[in-house]
Image (cartoon, coloured by chain):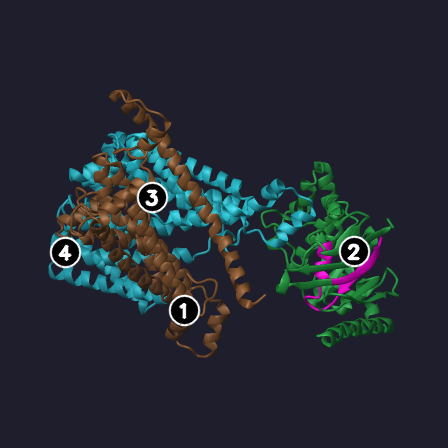
């Protein structure tokens, strides 16, 4: 067998091993979804037939349940249509454009995430390098997590508004508050991860604390940083969405969810939810990809992000 | 036929397929009688552990025949015919020592009274009485291995398979455990198959030494030991000990040469 | 540690000196006590240079005395020099706590109490500072109410708080948590015997954990109505996946040696599961239980932002925020924080008992 053929066989094997199970389950899930669409919507549909005196058979029922205006469970293609209409077929500046709303949510997510990461890294470095900072900061950090910030998002938004901060900043601050904690935890773990014998080795070279930090601790912490960044960005997104609810739900994906809920626009709710999920997946995947590239450059092999 | 505990004929074991194929065992034929203490010695990767695992039905030979107690290894396994001692003690950290020793007994559905009787007997044999309530992490490496041996002795397996059980321990502890193991062997009369890296250990403990070559694992030499069953550490300084060790060493060397000539 | 003590001591001495100076320059009848306490503070600070007054009882004394004095005078005008006095006493109390944390106690009972000293001290001083800042700086109630105002509102609204607690925590959060964790555990065990299903579900499970599940709240309302059932449904979805992923991971960490050992005993699949693998999975399962407790609490509250009947913590928070009754909002937050801490404590307690053998619990 030539090496090309062997490589191709190996590749197919890994594809089969890893992707096939996932694909199978996804296909299964889609089939189940369609089944439930028909099942859950049929009650309302039959009601409608009776009220309007329309005669029906199974195939008519199946088709109609998949194209209701306010279904209990929209069919996947209905959601796809709605997303298409509100993204591609609307101007980006229009208030109905899903892209407009997504960008509002995305912007406060990213700002909050960056602030949270910076804050988290700074705190982690102080904790690891300075005993005094550790005993003075740790209680505050732990205490900060006993306050359910998501639960008091409305209050935070309103209070900050009355102090003059409105728009992006209050929502971003909620995301910052949520995301700094996983970063601190992960970064501290990472900075402290090198084996004690490696630290001792540096000491035998008469390295300064700064040297040990930049040459040993910081590189060792990179995988941990990327793992916690994935958690942090996912939770930043949640913070941004919840932060949009209080101020009368004007703009953003969270607002779309709320208004859809008020007006019974099921498909709008679902499309906003799917869009938010796509956003979350893209963000987390981007961090994973960047982490993978960085780790590879640094020489990590199978671990990485 | 049936008085041979282990009977192997032309056993061959290959891992992998095609270009990635590795021949772990080649043409292994040997017999182990009841009550023998057989050591398997060879360089790393020579297949001695693989052979032990084949006897234990943890691996399957690709060709050849192997019988344990006159039946297939898997049947012997379901008959609970042997006890296995691994390189690391493998004690469960959530059970104390006496519960660790009783683990196989619980799985094999012995009664409560039987269990407590057998546990105290086994712990007695390895001199660990008094440590029943301790947890594995509270014991030293040597003591953990003794507990692991006690666990292998607690049910009625007449065959003991030991895979470098003392490899991770320091030499002083090793000597002590070697003596204890011999003592135990004489008291219980079990058949023991013992895999080791160490020539003195193999020569000291065994009635029969099987020398294996590096991969693909073949049997280079089978040495019957002239020493009586009851022996002490002093025999290690005797002439016969040195000459048998030399014979083992030559066997190991010739195994390498053979492979080099072939390759 | 000495470095920290010296820093604290220097600043404490500094603040006491400032206090002394300012209360002498603007001396009046009302700040005699402040003056006395500032002198005490200076004396205590001298231990930087001379080995006097080093006992932690003195530090404790000045801390307690200051708190009492300030509270008594807070609602009229604070005398001159109070602020530096507050800071210096806080630093002395901190020193006292540092000392007591270093001390070895003979009985387990006393050291357990000792372990609570630092958090309690921390909590007391936060509340104290909060009270002093909000009252002393005259912060409006609509921005941040003081602890005393919140406390009064808390006691006055016990019936409302209780009803909200039952609705959100007992009905929505707890029931959702039990169903979510239970089904996650069961399904993980069920699919454990199929490597194919594991390879398919594990990545999907990880993927879903990254999504904003809270967004399904309006959909649940559409399906189950406004009441607690829809909120519990959200909690079920939120807690299911972390439990599933963690249990599957936990079930696969048994080492090859441990599994081979089971084989040599002729153990069946269920015996191996029961005797070996569930025990090995326990640390992971408890990890998921802890994560899920936080998710359940927050999920139940936030789900109520999407519509709820006229009771519930989330409902109360959003409506009272709209009415600018922030004291009621904080009373609800107190309930939430208490529930969260107590549940976390209970789970950790059970975890320590059941997974006492794991290196992370043993303290290695």
Q: Which chain carries label 4?
A: C
Q: Position of residue B246 (x, y in %)?
A: 81, 74
Residue with the mark numbered 1? A219
Query: Residue C291: percent from the left, percent from the top?
Result: 40, 46
Q: Which chain carries label 3?
A: C
Q: Mark 4 points at which residue?
A: C80
Q: How far apart are marks 3 and 1 (CA)?
A: 34 Å
To which residue does mark 2 refer?
B192
Q: Residues within 10 Å of mark 2 (few under 14, many from 20)?
A: many
* Numbered disc in front, either 3 or 4: 3
Within 10 Å of disc 3 (Cα), the crowding (few <14, some 14-19, many 20+) is: some
Is B33 within the magenta? yes
Mark 3 — residue? C213
Q: Distance between the residues labelled 2 and 4?
A: 88 Å
Pick whichever, C183 or A49, lies toward us: A49
Tell me the quarter of the image containing the C terminus of chain B.
bottom right
Mark 2 vs mark 4: give the one in front.
Answer: 2
Is disc 4 in contact with disc 1, using a CB cutoff of under 8 Å?
no
Chain B image colour: green
Whether labels 3 and 1 share one chain = no
Task: Evaluate if marks 3 and 2 touch, with contact meaning CB atoms under 8 Å apart.
Answer: no
Residue A142 has which mark? none
């Amino acid at each position: 067998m030539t090496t090309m053929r062997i490589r191709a066989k190996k590749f197919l094997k890994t594809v089969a091993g890893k992707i096939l199970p996932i694909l199978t389950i996804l296909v299964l899930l889609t089939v189940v979804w369609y089944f439930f669409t028909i099942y859950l919507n049929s009650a309302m549909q039959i009601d409608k037939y009776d009220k309007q005196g329309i005669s029906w058979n199974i195939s008519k029922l199946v088709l109609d349940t998949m194209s209701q205006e306010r279904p209990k469970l929209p069919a996947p293609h209905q959601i796809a249509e709605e997303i298409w209409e509100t993204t591609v077929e609307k101007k980006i500046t229009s208030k109905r454009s899903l892209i407009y709303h997504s960008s509002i949510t995305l912007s406060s997510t990213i700002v909050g995430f960056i602030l949270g990461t910076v804050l988290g890294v700074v705190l982690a470095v102080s904790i690891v390098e300075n005993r005094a900072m550790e005993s003075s900061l740790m209680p505050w950090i732990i205490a900060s997590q006993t306050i359910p910030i998501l639960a008091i998002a409305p209050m935070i938004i309103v209070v900050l508004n009355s102090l003059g901060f409105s728009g992006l900043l209050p929502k971003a601050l909620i995301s910052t508050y949520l995301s700094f904690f996983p970063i601190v935890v992960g970064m501290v773990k990472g900075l402290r991860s090198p084996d004690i014998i490696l630290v001792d080795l540096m000491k035998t070279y008469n390295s300064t604390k700064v040297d040990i930090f930049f040459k040993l601790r910081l590189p060792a912490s990179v995988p941990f940083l990327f793992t916690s960044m994935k958690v942090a960005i996912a939770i930043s997104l949640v913070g941004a969405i919840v932060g949009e609810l209080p101020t009368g739900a004007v703009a953003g994906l969270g607002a779309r969810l709320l208004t859809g809920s008020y007006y019974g626009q099921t498909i709008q709710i679902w499309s906003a939810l799917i869009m938010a999920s796509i956003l979350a997946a893209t963000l987390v995947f981007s961090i994973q990809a960047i982490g993978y590239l960085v780790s590879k450059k640094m020489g990590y092999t199978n671990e990485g992000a | 036929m049936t008085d041979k505990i282990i009977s192997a004929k032309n056993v061959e074991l290959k891992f992998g397929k095609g270009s990635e194929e590795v021949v772990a065992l080649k043409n292994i034929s040997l017999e182990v009688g009841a009550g023998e203490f057989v050591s398997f010695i060879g360089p790393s990767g020579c297949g001695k552990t693989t052979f032990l695992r084949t006897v234990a039905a943890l691996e399957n030979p690709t060709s050849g025949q192997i019988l344990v107690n006159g039946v297939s290894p898997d049947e012997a396994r379901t008959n609970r015919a042997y006890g296995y001692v691994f390189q690391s003690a493998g004690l469960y950290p959530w059970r104390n020592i006496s519960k660790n020793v009783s683990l196989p007994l619980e799985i094999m559905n012995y009664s409560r009274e039987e269990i407590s009787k057998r546990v105290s007997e086994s712990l007695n044999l390895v001199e660990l009485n008094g440590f029943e309530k301790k947890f594995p992490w509270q014991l030293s490496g040597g003591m953990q291995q003794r507990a692991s041996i006690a666990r292998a002795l607690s049910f009625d397996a007449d065959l003991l398979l030991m895979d470098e059980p003392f490899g991770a321990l320091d030499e002083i502890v090793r000597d002590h455990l070697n003596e204890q193991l011999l003592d135990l062997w004489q008291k219980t009369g079990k058949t023991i198959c013992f895999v080791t890296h160490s020539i003195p250990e193999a020569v000291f403990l065994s009635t029969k030494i099987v020398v294996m070559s590096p991969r693909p694992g073949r049997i280079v030499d089978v040495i019957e030991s002239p020493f009586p069953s009851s022996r002490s550490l002093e025999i290690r300084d005797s002439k016969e000990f040195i000459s048998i060790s030399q014979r083992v060493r030559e066997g190991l060397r010739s195994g390498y040469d053979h492979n080099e000539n072939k390759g | 540690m000495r470095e920290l003590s010296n820093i604290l001591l220097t600043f404490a001495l500094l603040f006491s000196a400032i206090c002394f100076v300012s209360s002498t320059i603007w001396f009046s009848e009302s700040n005699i006590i402040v003056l006395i306490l500032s002198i005490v503070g200076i004396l205590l600070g001298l231990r930087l240079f001379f080995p006097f007054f080093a006992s932690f009882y003195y530090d404790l004394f000045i801390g307690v005395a200051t708190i009492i004095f300030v509270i008594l005078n807070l609602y009229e005008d604070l005398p001159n020099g109070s602020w530096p006095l507050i800071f210096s006493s806080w630093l002395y109390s901190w020193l006292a706590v540092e000392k007591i944390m270093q001390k070895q106690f003979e009985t387990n009972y006393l050291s357990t109490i000792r372990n609570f000293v630092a958090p309690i001290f921390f909590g007391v001083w936060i509340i104290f500072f909060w009270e002093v800042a909000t009252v002393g700086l005259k912060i409006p109630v609509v921005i941040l109410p003081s602890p005393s105002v919140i406390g009064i509102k808390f006691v006055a609204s016990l019936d409302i708080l209780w009803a909200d607690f039952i609705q959100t925590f007992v009905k929505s959060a707890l029931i959702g948590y039990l169903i979510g964790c239970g089904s996650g555990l069961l399904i993980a065990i069920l699919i454990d015997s199929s490597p194919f299903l594991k390879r398919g579900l594990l990545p999907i499970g990880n993927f879903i954990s990254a999504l904003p599940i809270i967004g399904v709240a309006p959909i649940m309302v559409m399906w189950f109505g406004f009441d607690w059932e829809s909120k519990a449904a959200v909690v079920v979805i939120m807690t299911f996946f972390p439990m599933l992923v963690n249990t599957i991971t936990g079930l696969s960490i048994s080492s090859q040696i441990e599994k081979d050992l089971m084989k040599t005993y002729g153990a069946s699949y269920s015996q191996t599961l029961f005797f070996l693998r569930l025990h090995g999975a326990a640390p992971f399962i408890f990890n998921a239980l802890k994560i899920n407790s936080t998710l359940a609490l927050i999920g139940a509250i936030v789900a109520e932002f999407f519509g709820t009947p006229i009771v519930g913590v989330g409902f109360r928070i959003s409506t009272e925020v709209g009415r600018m009754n922030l004291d009621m909002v904080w009373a609800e937050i107190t309930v939430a924080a208490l529930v969260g801490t107590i549940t976390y404590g209970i789970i950790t307690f059970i975890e320590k008992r059941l997974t006492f053998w794991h290196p992370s619990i043993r303290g290695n």
